[in-house]
Image: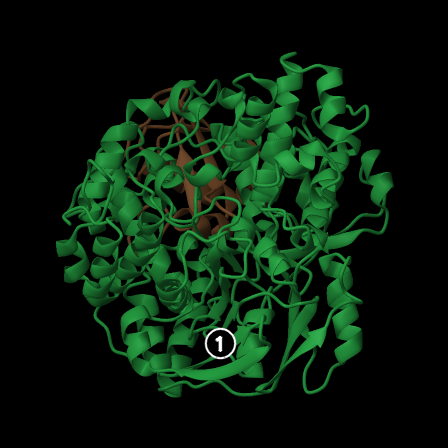
Chain colours: A brown, B green
Amino acid sequence: MITVRTQFLSHFKEIAGTGEAAFELDNGQVSELAEQICDRFGPRMRAVLIDPKTNELNARGTMFVDRKGRRISMSGTLDDGEEITFMMGTAGG
Amino acid sequence: MESRLLRVDLTSGELKSELIPHSIFERWIGGSGINNWIMWEHFLTHDINCDPRGPDNIFVFGVGPLAGTGAGSGIKGRITFKSPCYNMFGDSAGGGKFPYMARFAGYEYIAITGKAPKPVYLLICNGEVALMDAAHLWGKDTAETHAALQAELGDYPSKTHTLSISQAGENQVGIAGVVSDALRIHARGGGGAVLGSKNLKAIAVQGNGSLPVARPEDMLAWSEDFRKKIDGNEAVYGFKRRGTLGAVEMYQHIGSHFWRNNQGNMFRGDEIRSDNWVKKYHKYSEVCSADCYIACDAKYQIDGTESEAAKKYIGETFRRPEYLTTGSAAGALDVRDWSEVAHWGKLTNDYAIDNQDLSCSISFLMELKQRDLISDRDVAELFGHEQNLRWGNMEDIEACVESMVFQKNLFGQLFRDGPYYGALRYSEMKGKNFMKYAMYGKGGASFTEEVRPYPTWMNNMAVASRGADHLKGIGLIEKFQREDLSKVYFDGRTEAADLTIPELKGACTALAENQVALLNSYGVCLFHWMLDPADYTPQDYYGQAYAAVTGIERTPEELMRDGERICNLEKAFNSRIGMRREHDTVCERWMWEPNPEGTYSNAVAADMFETVLDEYYEWRGWEKESGLQTRSKLEELGLDDVADVLAQDGALADG
């Protein structure tokens, strides 16, 4: 069992109703984290977090990174104490 | 597909209507592609080394074939000219209603040359055109000019839509832009100074004409599919609500802002780096044109309760600032109050001035002052009176803006072409070298985001045809680490999505430049593609809409080649005026100083710069040593005629 902290920014914060949350994972997989997040925060979170066509994390207009700033993918594994940030992926203007 | 081109010779007053034939679209797609070709042809009979503020320069407005058709993909008009601030190829996009209303009024393209003997504006109404006296508009900002023209011309046969310059353009400030309907600035490159030099204050259009669509049923089907795709993307709702301000928290998290002249890369102050903008100021969302399924634009109104600073702006209402407006104020200048950031956006829009180059000119001086490299007396010398230059102080910042717009003093005059030329002139004047504090890329153009950790973005800053810029070849694969896209475009390879290595970063610039050239030629907004670059591919998905509207069938491969052709013409323009590899570079701070903070700290451009640039030339098929194009590449693109011109000018790699 490991603990992973999550940060939700802007749109994700609005959907989650909180800027931070912690999750306990049995096997440390990103897919497990994603499922727990969707279960806790509901269908709007699922809609923005998971691409239904591929079952991968939704890359469209989003950016999900670990503490080193690396984008995470559904098949990845996480270390105990890792922190994942969920953000809108925007640039320009 | 045919379009109408209005040629305006301001010297003689001649107004001439021409038809742009189908064959031109076959070669140049539309929009920016056709603008570029009109300018290229112009400079075959006029001196390309002319003074950009002189009558030999040309100003082209154009809008692509998808604009206003109901495609739902947003609309961008484009202005193209020789840049007066960077003295090279110049172009700039702007949204809003003006671009498609120009089509409804009868013209997709307007080419303006010469110089009017006195201030005029151009009126286009359902195909009828006239040059009108603009003496009563001279001296007005863009909001005042727009309001005056709307009152003067009324609402028949349609509301009046305008493209106008401010006092900055009248005074030929090199970094002056052109504003559409008083709301949306074509900021980059100094188009406002070109119009000011020609004594053309504005273009006003009215019309209720129609647009040609080759296969309306296919167009409607495409549009409906596009709408469903957008509605099915939950992330779009986040973008609708925040627009590009969604980048504030993301950039704060990873360290991608441009703080105090890029001495740092995170905003300071709890308020400005938070998402409070949405809670406190956002009043309502709106579409910038009538033809966009996203509607990322919004209005704010300040009631004075938001903060202490907000009391200065009670009642002010305007567009929500875009990210780079925020990046220039909260970043470059360290303004920490949202109402002041919003006011900066309105101020620079009303005065039609590029807030990237302006903020970096001011932040350059503020850093010199911070480091005691200049004294109070030196500052007084620049402004003609005692003047504070305090980070984040709006009073000081507004004094700099007024100095620039009205060319009141030495500061305005030295920095009228942005931070690079300003720093160069000031260093020369003082007999000291201040260049290490000037923030710029190619051509001297500036950009208020941290780019050091991103090799593709850094390369964009060095090679963009209109000077340092992110939108000419925006590096989505790299910044958003999209391995899936890297695999699609680079034969299963993933390196393009890895920030830490140089491989495929130059290739990414070339790829994105070609794709952006296509979107700019269609006349659509880039944001839809940026939200979903895997599905809304310019060469495939948008290509279907282009075919439905124009009847021009193209394979994705052919369209990518079309985009590449457009990029090569822009490159050829710059080669003709003498730009070579040594001009594809960035400022000292980006090149040599490690970025000091954030997730990707300690990156410097120099680590990968030359490797990435070499790869970019390789993917472009250009000569690495000189950076020049080769005849074989140009002939492959069907640009034999362009190769001949370059050969004549000694600007072709292989003779």
**Is B155 positioned to the left or the right of A34 in the image?**
right
Residue at the farthest top position: B372
Q: Is residue B546 above or below residue A66?
A: below
**Is B560 positioned to the left or the right of B29 in the image?**
left
Residue B390 x/y as whole percent = 73, 23
Instruction: Judge by depth and name the residue closer to the eye, B180 or B542.
Output: B180
Residue tagged by mark 1?
B108
Q: Is residue B534 visible?
A: no
Q: Is residue B579 visible?
A: yes
Residue B313 x/y as whole percent = 83, 44
Q: Is residue B589 above or below residue B299?
A: above
Instruction: Judge by depth and name the residue closer to the eye, B465 or B577.
Output: B577
Instruction: Judge by depth and name the residue closer to the eye, B279 or A13.
Output: B279
Residue B464 x/y as whole percent = 38, 45
**Residue drawn at point x = 69 percent, y = 41 percent:** B404
Residue B302 x/y as whole percent = 80, 48
Q: Chain of mark 1?
A: B
Task: Check the picture and name the quadrant holding the N terminus of chain B.
Answer: bottom left
**Is B100 positioned to the left or the right of B398 in the image?**
left
Describe the element under mark 1 as helix, strand or loop: loop
Among the 4 quarters of the image, the one containing residue B615: top left
Amino acid type, residue under disc 1 in the picture: Glu
Q: Is residue B27 above or below residue B369?
A: below
**Residue drawn at point x = 49 percent, y = 61 percent:** B56
Number of residue marks: 1
